[in-house]
Image: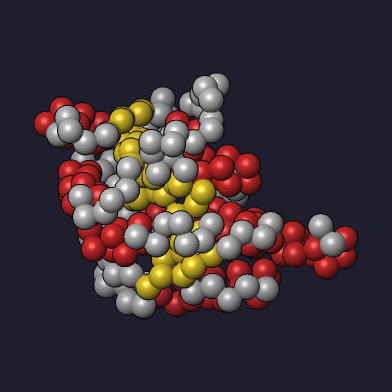
């Protein structure tokens, strides 16, 4: 899905927004509306890449209808030939985009326009704008506990003190192209952020509002695939830290 075109930033585009979708027929319009409402409040040039990651419902069709009825908005739609997973789609989107900065917005419409405005207005103040949620309605106590434990482990193994790793940080797109994560599953964001901090990237944490939606059994944090991918992410984070301690690199 990558491209061989010139990957340098387009000076006319500040921000590439990648909307990752899988079976979001019911939510993609709300997501696009939130993005459009947010960007209408900001003096930032942008593009929107909707990437359908192997949906089996009408996600792409609904997105194309939205694109047709909102021809004034800079929306592009791409379809993966099969489900490739969020981390792969995230990296592919960076290659497809042309903005100086890059951020993933999930297609399930859990971030209101106000949250996006809070995040995007900080662009330019650091290499990474890292949002975190003081409160996250809709998330069970069990999932909150798992999330807190995961964040604690990442901080211990990396030596950082970040509030939350999976909130969808804004990155310089160059950094995604240069240091893109190799982890699979939802842990790829922690892998990427900790790697960039080791490389000297600056960051700014921003408290925001959001909500949580249950994606079903396959997306449960208690699924065996997530245990495996999380263990792999934590191992890689610790391995990199040991390399710095032992070899200074």
Locate residue 13, reporting x and y percent: 38, 38
Where 243 sits versus 96, above or below? below
Residue 31 seen in this snapshot? no
Quarter of the image with the C terminus is bottom right
Locate residue 211, reporting x and y percent: 27, 66
Residue 32 seen in this snapshot? yes
**Residue at figure coordinates x 45%, y 33% from the top left:** 10
Residue extending farthest to the top is 4
Q: Nearer the viewer, residue 203 or 139?
A: 203
The colour scheme of the drawn protein is secondary structure
Q: Nearer the viewer, residue 243 or 144?
A: 243
Q: Nearer the viewer, residue 232 or 163?
A: 163
Locate residue 216, reporting x and y percent: 32, 55
**Residue at figure coordinates x 17%, y 33% from the top left:** 72
**Residue at figure coordinates x 40%, y 49% from the top left:** 104
Q: Is residue 136 left or right of residue 244?
A: left
Where 127 sits versus 184, above or below? below
Marks counted in the figure total: 0
Where 14 sits versus 123, above or below? above
Locate residue 143, reporting x and y percent: 40, 71
**Residue at figure coordinates x 18%, y 48% from the top left:** 33
Residue extending farthest to the right is 247
Residue extending farthest to the left is 69
């Amino acid at each position: 899905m990558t491209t061989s075109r010139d990957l340098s930033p387009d000076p006319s585009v500040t921000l590439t927004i990648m909307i990752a979708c899988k079976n979001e027929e019911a939510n993609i319009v709300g997501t696009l509306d939130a993005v459009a409402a947010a960007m209408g409040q900001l003096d930032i040039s942008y593009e929107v890449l909707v990437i359908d990651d192997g949906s089996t419902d009408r996600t792409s069709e609904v997105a194309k209808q939205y694109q047709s009825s909102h021809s004034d908005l800079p929306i592009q739609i791409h379809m993966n030939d099969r489900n490739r997973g969020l981390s792969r789609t995230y990296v592919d989107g960076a290659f497809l985009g042309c903005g100086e900065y890059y951020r993933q917005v999930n297609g399930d419409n859990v971030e209101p326009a106000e949250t996006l405005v809070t995040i995007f207005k900080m662009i330019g103040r650091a290499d990474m704008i890292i949002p975190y949620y003081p409160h996250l309605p809709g998330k069970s106590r069990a999932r909150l506990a798992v999330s807190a434990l995961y964040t604690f482990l990442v901080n211990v193994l990396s030596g950082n003190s970040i509030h939350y790793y999976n909130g969808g940080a804004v990155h310089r797109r160059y950094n995604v192209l240069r240091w893109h994560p190799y982890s699979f599953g939802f842990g790829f964001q922690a892998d990427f952020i900790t790697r960039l901090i080791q490389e000297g990237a600056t960051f700014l944490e921003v408290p925001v509002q959001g909500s949580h939606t249950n994606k079903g059994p396959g997306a449960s944090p208690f699924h065996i695939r997530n245990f495996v991918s999380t263990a792999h992410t934590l191992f890689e984070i610790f391995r990199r830290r040991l390399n710095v301690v032992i070899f200074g690199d």
